[in-house]
Amino acid sequence: MDKYTNKSIHLIGNAHLDPIWLWRWQEGCSEVMQTFRSALDRLNEYDDFVFTCSSASYYRWVEEIDPDMFNEIRTRVKQGRWVPVNGWWVQPDCNIPSGESFARQALYSQLYYHEKFGRICETGYNVDSFGHNWNLPQLLTKGGMRTYVMMRPDTSENPDMPQDLFWWDGPDGTRMLTYRIQRSYARTGTHAIDEEVKYLDGRADEKNHGMMLFYGVGNHGGGPTRGDIEHIISKMDGGFQQLKFSSPDDYFDEMCAARFDIPAWSEDLQHHASGCYSATSMVKQLNRKAENWLQAAEKWNTLAVKRDGLAAATEELAKAWKDVCFNQFHDILCGCSIMEAYEDVRDSMGHAMTIAARAENNALIKLAGKVDTWVDGVSDPVALVRHGRNHQDFPRPVIVFNPLSFPVNVPVRASQPSQRVTSHDGTEAAFQNVRSSRSNDTHLDTLFMAKVPAMGYATYWLEFREWDDFENEAVSDVKADGLTIENEHMRVVFDEQAGGIKSLIGKADGYDYAQGKILAVPTVIDDHKTDTWAHKIFKFHDIKGAMKLESIELIESGPARALVRTKHVFNESCLIQEFILASGQKTLRVKCKAIWQERFTLLKMPFALGGGDPVSTYEIPGAYIKRPCDGDEEPAQAWADLTVTAADGTRRGLSLLNDSKYSYDCPVTGDGETTLRITLLRNVIFADHYSFRPPANFNFTDEGLQRFEYGIRVHTGEAEDSGVMYDAAMFNGRPVALAEGYHKGSEPQSGSFLTVTKPNILVTAFKLCEDGSGDTIIRAYECEGKNTPRVGFVCNLIEAGFWADFGKHEVKTFRIDKDGFVKETDFLEGVVEE
Amino acid sequence: MKEPYVLTARPCRFCGIYGAGDPQIPAELYSGQSEAPDLSGFPLPLPSKKSDYTCSAVTDDGVMWYGASTGLTRYDPAADRGDDLIMYFSADRDLPDNNVRALLAKDGGLWALTETGAAFIEMKMIGAEEKALMLLEETLKYVDRHGMVSQKHLEIPGDVASAVKYGHSDNDGGFTAEFCIGEMYRYAVYKREKGTDHPDTLAAKKVAARALEACLLLFHISGRGDGFLARSYLCPGEPVPDDGLFFRKEGGKATCIETRQSKRVGIAGKVIDASAPVPDRLAKLYRDAGYSDDGIVYKGDTSSDETTLHIMNMIVSHDIIGEDDPELDELIKISLRGLMNHILDHGYELHDCTGKPTTWAKWSGQYFVSEVGYVDACLNAAEILMYLKAAMHITGEQGRWREEYDKLIAMGYADLTEKHFDRQHQAGLSLCVEPVEDIMFGDHALATKAYFGLCMLEKDEGLLKKYRNGYKSWRTTIRREYNPGYDLPFKLACPDEEIDMEMMATWLYRTNVSRLASGVSFMGRHDTPVQKQRAGKLESSWMPPSDERFISKYDRDPVEYRNVDSGGMTCVESCYVYTHAYWMGRYYGFFN
């Protein structure tokens, strides 16, 4: 063996710990306590034994409950015999969390490790997660990790992926040395270990590099047993020189010093548990909502801290993010834990969102308080004006806040009706009075189109004077006639029989994307053959039937929007959809309410597109990916797109957006026809593992009331050039309308707190640094897959103005000090740099 | 190819520096009232902190100038290119120092009073070709040394006229080859556009031919007669630095001069054969200046870098000037045959008089499995394959070149050309550095030459695919430079790939009209984030325009966070960085 060849088998003693799965978190916490005690005992008993364990949240449990045991662990970490891996809060699902969530996983965990152990984790480690998004190489690297260990999918699920050691290249060009566990992360018992040693010995010879063998009782904790360790020692004593007690860190160090020729892989690592992209809608909806809310709340809090001296909510928001990070654990977010666990999840996500709501509200009120909304002559509270009981001479101010880093023109709802809406500069805004959710007083709210600057606000004035007969003078592009609704971008004609869309015309060139097909007919898929995970099932194509249209009618037609409501039924279930086309919007928004009772089903919404060369594109955390149109169920985030070469030779696409869904497929459905389908519901038994089902009163994942929204959008050209990512961001980062009083203030009625000079650079974090320095953190990523040099950022509030070059799909984090000088750092905010 | 990008005349900076009390400084600059600008709502990043700005002025063209204690900012709200909205002027290149105290718009320019003097700044509209010719004139006047162009030290900082007459660079040969390529393209463009006998064409031909002669001379200067390529040479009277292996010729022999390296290698004082004649046409470069072969000092220990740049130059020169100047073309063929036979005879190595390979000129399989050669292997494999393709192309012969080429392919050299990114990354991991910290940025130029040459000369689709893959594996770091000298060959070699013509235009537009090095103030700019890499290297988060960052040849990281020009702050550098890129773009129809 030359000096550059190393075929050692590194024995990784570990205990796979699921904090929630077939048990609630309390039991998971207990399992952590017991496992850690056991591991410490084994370390005391065997001098060479090394223990590896991930997940900062587990360490924090131990620190809080048993400080003495925690100190023992610190000692062992210092000795290099207890090796923390994966600088994340848990081993999360690696498809569903947003890019910003992965940043937070690293931020809170690596800073915790650094504080408690004086080191961060350099090995990423998600051995049980059900697939790995393509952007992970970058997201791991910028979280301080250099190498990665994963296992799923296995070779039967994806035989094309490299095995053992390989280079994994992300869409931005980041490369990660990755180890794919061959068979199990938890070998235990003499027979299993013997067999694995023999197997890996062969693989090491074949591949000409070392391997890792993961041993120890797992899933519900446990770790290496005395029997395991003693058996290994006896094998070593018996001449197995290639075996060594080790850790993933040491394995990778050794491999890096060696020389090997290994394959490279430039896609995501899929598929395993395709049912998990959609199972248990509730947890996925909570995840998306919390992610969006926390990001927005932190932006507003930071601005209010910097401008108005509001107390920083950094610590509280960190607590909230940690809740969210914990609930991104793969068995939780994938919807495959027991039903009772989701009660806990709902509570802790509620905790997180309450923190977000308070931080946001405090900040917005503070920020709004400095806006000059004074109107001469007003002396009574605005509430009287708003309710029309007094001072109807005066319009009432509503300040709309936009958390996104680009300007938006969006519909905004304010309580109570109006007769006129104008912007801060007197421009008439399109509006209409729409039915409120109240069943008293006017029953009406004002819905108006608001133009709001990037990460900024705009004041709108809503007037209601009973004695005046106002004309709505705003020019509007919205029209409705029967079952046809349209605006400047789109003309939509509904079908009276099926309740779908029979004509979907992009008005840029008049092309009808429906091409004679009926789009958006809700379709029920049979799903009784598999389990919650859908193990070994990658396609959901067994159609039970289309939902039947029960009613369809045009509900609203006004300057701000047109709305068609449909109701479909299937057995005892129903789906009510409100198709909303608002002024100037490129997206037809569909607000859904379902009462779902169909067991062992998926509900899909299909959109067929005629044409050749189909390409499907999906948003993944912080990037997008193109995948084959082969009908496999695919994990994705807020948007998916199908683009084809239409009969007229033009590349044309249809995009679907959503506020809480993560699952799509894109099968070829006919000659020259491909169909993009969003999976809206999946109703199977909770935690049904491999479908062994003794009779019981089963609970189902998506049973009962479901509310969600999706959107439909058409374009020419490719998806990445269509702007779908901006509409998806608007779909999820919605503005907040604050009913404001009359007051004098130093700030104008409209303003932007942050300017970014290139539209394809989206800001996901505007926050205070976690070290309490008062430095500001800005994180942004390139969303169109284009190298984008010379992007300017200007935020006068923090005296910052700087340039940065972005590569395609690149995420960058900047730290701005009190004088406005900037360092580019990573997710760890430069806190662990010194 | 798409329509050519139309390059237009753009504002270029001309900065005159005046010492304190210089009578040319207008009196009103001292007495005038200059108000601090209100920049509270300024829409773009500014190079200085807002509170540092103390004075302002507006020139006749409506451009605003803001003086700060940390430099001078020009803001042209009407600029038709985003990259020209904001410009930064700093010491020492543009200002005597950065503490700007007063501004005065006068005589179509701007006077800036600083703590230690004043500067008069004019913005002149300069066309891309005009700039190329201005730079060429400067290089020929101040940098040229016996036809070689790299850089010249200045006796007086900032005064190009004080360039010393002597001075060498390790890479005289390589830099001159790059320069020659640019001038060959210029000649070809003029010949195509103006005609063979046009005075401009003839002048261009003369410059190109002289540069080529200077390059080819290095193939013969040693007098060893075995094809050995020298790095550089010095004439009598030029000081010999203690930097490498030097040999002084005398009476058909050459003696190794005592230097630290020659002593270390154990050949100081060694006498070797130097009797092989130097072709007269090439020797004219020093004979016409009054020197004979005796007393000439040549530099050995030549690297693969030099070899690669020379051979790419030979390909371009053969293609462009070969038919017009058969004598020179024959010299190209003789020189290349000699070098290639040397390399092949010595087991894919260039050997010094020690009988051992030079430090870096190794392309053998044995080197590729060595500690250092493991990472070099991918580039060096591409290089040797390119040399052999060049030999076939230029000499028109197959024979030995073809046999060796096929042999190397069978040995897996073509496969190796694809593995740069793999090995680079692995080396980075093992050294605990970011890949960008483990790069010799000069390798970007070498990789461009080697892979471009291969992709242009290889017709076999299977091999071409490998070479293209290999070329692409370099793009992670090359792309960041937006350097047309890299991006244009890449586009030619890999036509399906996208390049950013706007950024390339900015690169050309914003290159200074002079290569006079004196450093800039880049570190500490308020608009420039600094990023610390894993092993501590500092880079900026963006690549500012060429006229706001340090001057370098094709051998430095352009986003390195530094103030000092790569040749120091007291030199004038060769123009080839600009002229090579510009004339290549013109030759291939990228620019108009």
Image (cartoon, helix red, strand yellow):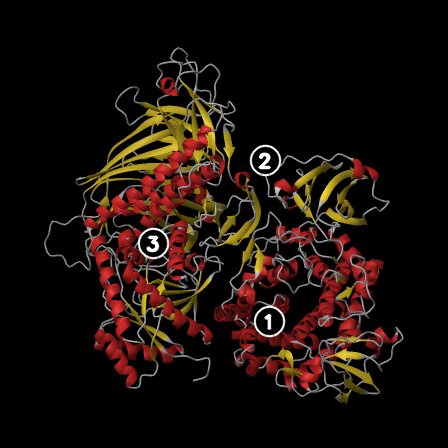
Q: Nearer the viewer, residue B503 or A791?
A: A791
Residue A218 position by quadrant = bottom left
Which residue is under mark 1? B458
Q: Is disc 2 placed on a helix, strand or loop?
A: loop
Q: Nearer the viewer, residue B307 or A118?
A: A118
Which residue is under mark 2? B41
Q: Is residue A466 above or below residue A17?
A: above
Q: Amino acid at mark 2?
A: Gly
Q: Is residue A771 above or below residue A497?
A: below
Q: Is disc 1 placed on a helix, strand or loop?
A: loop
Can residue A682 be seen by looking at this rendering?
Answer: no
Whole-percent x and y of residue B172? 74, 71
Which residue is under mark 3? A634
Q: Earlier in the sequence, mark 1 or mark 2?
A: 2
Q: Nearer the viewer, residue B348 or A394?
A: A394
Quarter of the picture holding the N terminus of chain A: bottom left
**Mark 3 or mark 2, whichever is nearer to me:** 2
Mark 3 vs mark 2, CA separation in Å: 46 Å
**Mark 1 or mark 3, whichever is nearer to me:** 3
Instruction: Kindly indicate whether the residues beneath marks 1 and 2 are on one polypeptide chain.
Output: yes
**Residue at point 55% right, 65% down?**
B437
